[in-house]
Amino acid sequence: MKNEIEIDFLEPGLAIIISSLENVEEALKNNKELTKTLDKLNEVEEVEDLFEILNTFKSFEVELENQIRALKHKDEFELICNLQIASSMADFLKPDNFLFKFTDSIEDGAEKSLVTQENILEIYKEEIINKINIIYSESVLKFKNIFSDEVEFTKVLKIASEENNLNDLREASKILINILKIEKTVNDDNKYELLKELNASECLINLVDIWNQYEMDFEEE
């Protein structure tokens, strides 16, 4: 991709979207609109074009979910996860969302001189962990009418809302999603609505994991 969109979070975020939607495409097989969108995402070079493509994807996201559910596929839950991860990352890559706003605050802030190439990723990671905590905190309130304070799901969610260790957040995300997957007392409509919140955090964890891999690869060179 050209330098225009080689911003810290754009390329790994785009990679998450593409890999997630490719899994959906494989299951749906003949969704021409999705295939066309993926082709464009793989070829995009300008950030403005990326925003337009992601907006197009968001416009038929509900249709994709309906098609997945109509398949009665054995991996329906995982496919919905893939779709929601792609959707959440598409939202986070919008210019008015927190990643761009945080970038602007760094570039315009009084502490700009303290930001170096060596610490920039750590600064972003801290901001993302803070965002994950907020998502989980808000989810505690959203889920309170479905899960009581005594059940494991709520207990893990509350712990995760205050956790600042990425490894622990990663483990909490897996536990929460797995609990929801096997939960029998919640209908699919409510389950997938709740799952959106969990996958919003999951996609941010995936973003940090890609950054960590970049750092490891760089150190090995």
Image (cartoon, rainbow, N blue to C red):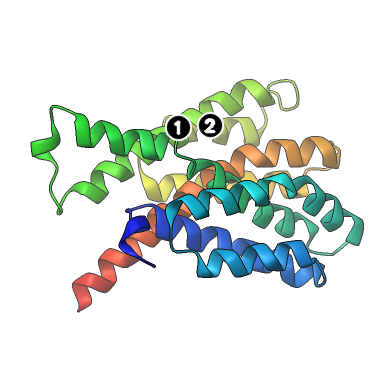
Q: In the picture provided, is 176 more to the left or to the right than 50?
A: right
Extreme-bottom residue of the structure: 221
* Image: 8 above or below 179: below
Q: CA distance from mark 2 to mark 1?
A: 5 Å
Residue to which mark 1 is pinned: 133
- Given residues 205 and 9, the one toward you in this image is 9
Mark 1 element type: helix
Would you call the spot at circle 1 few (<14 residues within 10 Å), some (14-19), or many (20 or more)?
many
Residue 36 lies in quadrant: bottom right
**Does the rendering let one see residue 142?**
yes
Q: Hey, what amino acid is under mark 1?
A: Asn
- In the shown orientation, is residue 34 left or right of residue 156? right
Q: Which residue is mark 2?
A: 136
Mark 2 neighbour density, 10 Å: few (under 14) some (14–19) many (20 or more): many
Q: What residue is shown at x 68% (from left), y 21% (from top)?
A: 144
Give the residue drawn at x 91%, y 56%: 70
Where residue 158 appears, as percent x and y from the top left, is: 53, 28
Q: Residue at x 38, y 39 (%)?
A: 100
Residue 197, x across and y down, in percent: 62, 37
Left or right of 108 in this view: 55: right
> Horizontal and vertical percent for residue 42?
54, 69
Circle 2 SS class: helix
Q: Residue at x 49, y 41 (%)?
A: 94
In this figure, what is the number of numbered marks? 2
- Of residue 213 and residue 175, the one placed in the foreground of this image is 213
User: Taking the image as drawn, is residue 129 in sight?
Assistant: no
The spot of residue 47 in percent (x, y) is 43, 53
Which label was assigned to residue 157?
none
> Mark 2 and 1 residues: CB-CB less than 8 Å, in contact?
yes
The amino acid pointed to by label 2 is Tyr
